[in-house]
Every structure is written in structure tokens, then in C-alpha cells.
Amino acid sequence: MEGVHIIDGANFYERESRKVALEMITRGWLVFSDGFTVSSVYGVGKRALDVLASGTLLLATFPIMILTAIAIKLEDGLKAPVIYSQERVGLNNQVFKVHKFRSMITDAEKNGAVWARKNDTRVTRVGEFIRKVRIDELPQIFNVLNGTMAFVGPRPERPVFVEQLSEKIPFYAERHRVKPGLTGWAQLCFAYADNEEDTREKLRYDLYYIKNQSLLLDLLIIIQTVEVVLFKKGSR
């Protein structure tokens, strides 16, 4: 009918829920749907925002990082490492090293990689606190500054888990169309994922971000992240 706007089920679901309906999309939808393409202007603007936001955060939190390092040493001993690095999968499936404050015991993965879970007994007392207030993620500021990560984007995952999840969850590999982020739409909208079903739900939000990414959305995510960290507003 003339003058009537028609929208398909997948796009209606996306518009109303701010996430993508994995069960309703096809490979063709990823190719022909509106979105998923960004201009070179956005790329330049996003990089400028990354440098500005991460540089500001580094200056603001540097004293906190020093105190965190001291607290880890006091709990675990002077020889205990403060930072730990892990391989993660980034843009275009490139593997890179991500850095965090160590929040678990030093031999947490002596038997191999496992999902981190709620009430994980491997987490130290200092680690429990810095995870709660997200201080453990602060060293990733340097990943943003060196360009292996963005300030906003899907959280990076370990290669072993990416391989497993890509086989089980449709379109999981599409997360690697963009740089991984220090914060993201999925982190704001959904709780921590420690199993396949939760990861599937977070992917719905990640794909929504990838499809609709813009400087305005990036700024909104940064502002909401600050509200969550400082005031627990909207925290889940």
C-alpha cells in the first residue's frame, strides 16, 4: 500500500530490542542489510576518539593503577607478577596480546584454559575487588593506544574459545569485522557471559553495534560506561 512503511521481522526485532535476532537472519542479510559499512571519516574520527578517551583515562587512573600494583604485591608477594598477558583474537582474526591486572592465583590455568565464572575460587581477594570495579581492565588502555583495540567494540576472546564458539554459534566470527573494545554495547546490555548460551545472547548485541556503529553510538556507550562504573547506574 502506498505510504505504508513495511519492515521485516528481523529489522523490527532489532529496532525494538537493540539487538540482532540470530535465529531470523541469513548470510545474505549480513551482505544486503542496511549498515555494516562505515565511511573513512568515521574511521578517522573513531581513532581520534580512541586516543582522546584512552589518554584521558590513563591520566585519570594512573594513581589507581599504581595502588593496584602495590595491593597485588602485598597480597601475593614481591615476586608475584602484577600484569598478565593473554592471546586474544582481534580485527580480521588477527591474534594479539591483551594485558590485565592479575586477579587470579598465579597457576590459575595450570590444567589449561577454562571459562572464568562467577564466584571463581581462583580469584584472589584483591582480584575480586578490582574485577568488581573493573580496575583489572585498565592496562588495556595501552592496547587502545597502540591500535590493537578500540575504546568501544566487542570484547576480545581467546583463540581456543573463538574456535569452539565459531563452530557452535552462527555468525560468531562476524565479531571480528571490527576491532575489539575496552567497553561495548554488549557489556552494557548484558551480564558477564560464562557459557555458550550467554555468549550467544551477547553476540546479538555485538552484531547490533557492528551494524549500527557511529561516533554518536560510541560516545553514548562511553558515557553509559562511566555511569555504570562510577554510579552503578544501569549495572547488571
Image (spheres, rainbow, N blue to C red):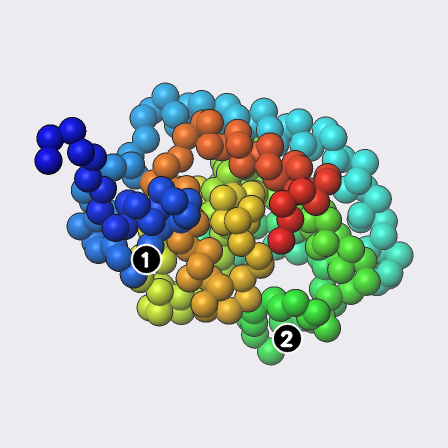
Query: How many numbered callouts?
Result: 2
Res. 127 visible in picture: yes
Mark 1 neighbour class, 10 Å CA radius: few under 14, some 14 to 19, many 20 or more: some
38 to 21, vertically: above or below? above
The single residue placed furthest to the bottom in the displayed view is 111
Q: Secondary structure at mark 1?
A: helix
Q: 65 or 125, which is in the foreground?
A: 125
**Residue 142 seen from this side:** no
The amino acid at mark 2 is: Lys
What's the mark number on residue 108? Answer: none
Between discs 1 and 2, the one toward the N terminus: 1
**Quadrant housing residue 51:** top right
x%, y% of residue 83? Answer: 70, 52
Q: Is residue 223 left or right of residue 1?
A: right
Distance in Å between CA atoms under marks 1 and 2: 36 Å
Type of the residue with mark 1: Leu
Question: To which residue does mark 2 refer?
Answer: 110
Looking at the rendering, in which quadrant would you find the N terminus? top left
Q: From the viewer's perspective, is residue 113 above or below residue 34?
A: below
